[in-house]
Image (tube, rainbow, N blue to C red):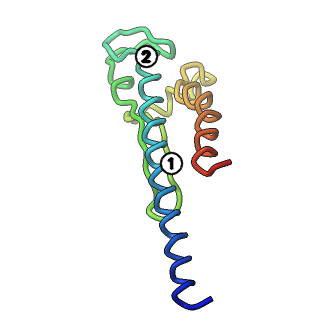
Amino acid sequence: MSVEGVDKVKKKISDIFVVRKAQLYALCSYYAELAKQEFDSRQPSGQNAEGEFWTSRTGQAAMRVFGKAGYDGAIAVFWALAHGVDYGVYLELANDRRHASLDKIIKPMVLFFLQDVKEIYGQ
C-alpha cells in the first residue's frame, strides 16, 4: 500500500472517530437533560416544597441541581447529574442516604444509555 493509501485510511479512521465522538456527546447531552427533567418532576424547587427525596426549606438545593454533558478534550465523553450547592453531598450521603436523589435517577437510565451507545457503534 502506498503512503497515499495509508494516509487515506488514517483520515477515514480519524473521521469516524470525530463523528462517533459527536454522536456520543449529543447522546450524553440528551441523557443529562433527561436526568434533570426526571429530577425536577420528582423534587419540586419551591420553598418548603415536599418532594420525593426531601422537604426543601429554601428551594435552593433543588433549583441548583443540574445535568451536564462534556468531554475531556481527548477521548472521554460523559454526562452527569449533580448538586450545585455545597451541602449537596450531605443530602446524598447523610442519614444512611435516606435523602439521596441522584443515584436513584441515574442508575435506571444507565442501561438505556448503554443500549444507545451500542447502537452508535453498530453492536
| Label 2 CA crowd tier, 10 Å (few <14, some 14–19, many 20+) | few
- Residue 50 picture location, percent across and down: 42, 8
Residue at image point 41% right, 20% down: 40
Residue 22 or 53: which is nearer the viewer? 22
Q: Residue lying furthest bottom in this view? A: 2
Query: Which of the numbered marks, if any, corresponds to residue 41?
Result: 2
Q: Is residue 9 left or right of residue 41?
A: right
Image-quadrant location for residue 85: top left
Label 2, label 1: how many angstroms apart (C-alpha)? 23 Å
Residue 100 image offset from top left, x and y in percent: 55, 24
Residue at disc 2, secondary structure: helix
Up-down: is 18 above or below 79? below
When the figure is inspected, residue 8 is found, relative to residue 72, above or below; the finding is below
* Residue lying at 50% horizontally and 70% vertically, measured from the top left: 14
Q: Residue at x 37, y 9 (%)?
A: 49
Q: Is residue 93 above or below residue 78?
A: above
Point out the image quarter for the N terminus: bottom right
Picture disc at residue 32: none
The mark nearer the N terminus, 2 or 1, is: 2
The amino acid at mark 1 is Phe
Mark 1 neighbour density, 10 Å: few (under 14) some (14–19) many (20 or more) = some
Judge left or right: residue 84 versus residue 75. Answer: left
Q: Which residue is mark 1?
A: 78
User: Residue 48 at what x, y percent from top left?
Assistant: 35, 9
- Residue at 50% in and 30% down: 90
The location of residue 54, given as percent across then percent down, is 48, 15
Amino acid tagged 2: Ser
Q: Is residue 6 above or below residue 90?
A: below
Q: Is 98 or 95 nearer to us in this picture?
A: 98
